[in-house]
């Protein structure tokens, strides 16, 4: 086992996580500012579950809303970046284990990545 | 309540929840959900969705600091993530079919269990010698962490039992929108015999990936409401970072008991309201 490579991998992962969380925070903050500036005195009701509108439940819709600088779209994009952060960590680990020629763990990380991909891109009625 | 007032209340509450979660080692989710549901009367599904996102934020935010220490065991984490992510998918799928009241009751009991675990005595000494476990050797799970006198090596044991417990932890995470950190640490400490330093950081590392596995399902189902999730995420992360920083100075038995009492009260209320159909 090459301990040095493992440690370098951990450092890069740490940086990756930090960047993802920071980017997500900026987007969520921006979206919240837009929403509060325009609808601060509205009285939303969250007692009853109504599910989100379709535009805020899929990637394409969220991207469109965010590009239009819609507050909720920006927040939702920030939340997507947040969810993508640990996914990016797993994806990076696949490459790192490949570089270490640790084939067992290339397979292990690919399995985890496949489960995550199913959650994000699969159909969930 | 106006949107601005709601936003501020949820933000302050999540800040406190993140702080408390980090101090007790229970994670912010176990406090965020009862706060939203019991105090602010938010629907449980929105609360669980927002809590799950705060779990990802605090896990990723704290991991950035942890990983540099070289304490976590990347291979143990990766291998067990197979179990936690599959469990999380199953839990999130189940969430749609279980009545809200029942989810609240399960949440309450899990909360009670977590509170009990948070005040328990630490596990015995970790496995540092003896022959290697065959599965652990095949998967290169044995690890080491930097100690004051050079690296401390340890062996990992009972891999199948640990793997099974991790699947349960993942399932609870997906069903309830919490990190299940306490159960993850138990699996690694008591069953797989990792040293506490390695298990706590490795657990934190896994929590974000586990939560991401149910987040996709939550998004598609419309559980992720931007206006509830935003103040929760923005509050829980700084709260948790502050809690982690103050932890070494505030680690007293009295404080832990006080927190455990708060958690037990919240749990009892969740169970009562869930069972009587008020949620």
Image (cartoon, rainbow, N blue to C red):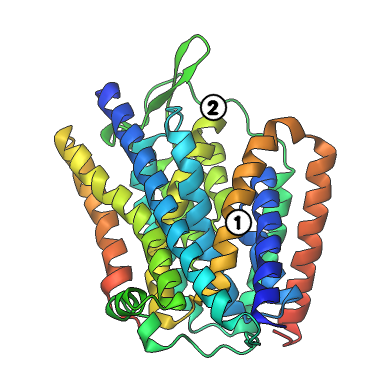
Which of B112 and A99 lies nearest the eye of the viewer?
Answer: A99
Q: Secondary structure at mark 1?
A: helix
Task: Identify the residue at horizontal 55%, vertical 81% (top origin).
Answer: A38
Which chain's residue wears label 1? B
Drawn side of residue A77 relative to residue B180, left or right: left
| Circle number at residue B126 | 2
Q: Position of residue B274 (x, y in %)?
A: 71, 80
Mark nearer the viewer, 2 or 1: 1
The residue pinned by badge 1 equals B236
Q: Considering only vertical position in the picture, is B256 above or below B110? A: above
Q: Position of residue B216 (x, y in %)?
A: 37, 70
Please rate how many residues cluster around mark 2, counting C-alpha atoms within 10 Å: few if below 14, some from 14 to 19, many from 20. some
The first of marks 2 and 1 along the sequence is 2
Task: Identify the residue at horizontal 76%, vertical 74% (top origin).
Answer: B39
| Circle number at residue A25 | none
| Cα gap from disc 2 to disc 1, whole angstroms | 32 Å
Location of the N terminus of chain B by quadrant is bottom right
Quarter of the rendering containing residue B121: top right
Q: Considering only vertical position in the picture, is B172 above or below B202? A: below
Quarter of the rendering containing residue B4: bottom right
Q: Position of residue B166 (x, y in %)?
A: 46, 53
Which chain's residue wears label 2? B
């Amino acid at each position: 086992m090459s301990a040095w490579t493992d440690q370098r991998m951990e450092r890069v992962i740490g940086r990756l996580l930090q960047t993802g969380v920071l980017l997500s925070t900026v987007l969520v903050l921006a979206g919240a500012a837009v929403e509060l500036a325009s609808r601060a005195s509205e009285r939303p009701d969250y007692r009853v579950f109504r599910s989100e509108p379709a535009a805020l439940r899929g990637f394409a819709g969220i991207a469109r809303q965010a590009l239009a600088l819609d507050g909720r779209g920006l927040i939702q994009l920030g939340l997507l970046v947040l969810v993508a952060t640990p996914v990016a960590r797993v994806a990076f680990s696949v490459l790192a284990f490949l570089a270490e020629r640790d084939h067992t763990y290339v397979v292990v990380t690919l399995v985890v990545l496949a489960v995550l991909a199913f959650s994000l891109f699969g159909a969930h009625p | 309540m106006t949107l601005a007032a709601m936003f501020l209340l949820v933000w302050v509450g999540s800040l406190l929840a993140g702080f408390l979660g980090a101090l007790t080692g229970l994670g912010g989710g176990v406090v965020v959900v009862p706060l939203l549901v019991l105090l602010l009367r938010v629907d449980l599904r929105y609360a669980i969705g927002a809590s799950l996102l705060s779990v990802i934020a605090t896990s990723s935010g704290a991991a950035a600091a942890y990983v540099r220490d070289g304490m976590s065991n990347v291979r143990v984490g990766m291998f067990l993530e197979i179990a936690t992510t599959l469990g999380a998918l199953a839990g999130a799928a189940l969430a749609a079919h279980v009545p809200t009241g029942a989810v609240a009751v399960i949440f309450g009991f899990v909360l009670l269990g977590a509170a009990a675990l948070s005040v328990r005595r630490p596990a015995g000494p970790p496995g540092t010698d003896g022959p290697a476990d065959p599965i652990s050797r095949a998967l290169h799970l044995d690890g080491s962490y930097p100690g004051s006198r050079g690296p401390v090596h340890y062996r990992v044991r009972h891999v199948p039992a640990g793997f099974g417990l991790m699947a349960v932890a993942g399932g609870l995470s997906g069903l309830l929108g919490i990190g299940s950190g306490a159960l993850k640490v138990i699996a690694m400490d008591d069953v797989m015999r990792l040293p506490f330093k390695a298990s706590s950081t490795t657990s934190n590392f896994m929590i974000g990936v586990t939560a991401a596995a149910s987040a996709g399902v939550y998004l598609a189902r419309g559980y992720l409401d931007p206006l509830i999730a935003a103040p929760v995420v923005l509050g829980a992360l700084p709260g948790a970072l502050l809690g982690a920083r103050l932890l070494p100075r505030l680690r007293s038995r009295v404080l832990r008991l006080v927190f455990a009492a708060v958690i037990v009260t919240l749990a009892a209320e969740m169970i009562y309201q869930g069972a009587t159909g008020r949620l």
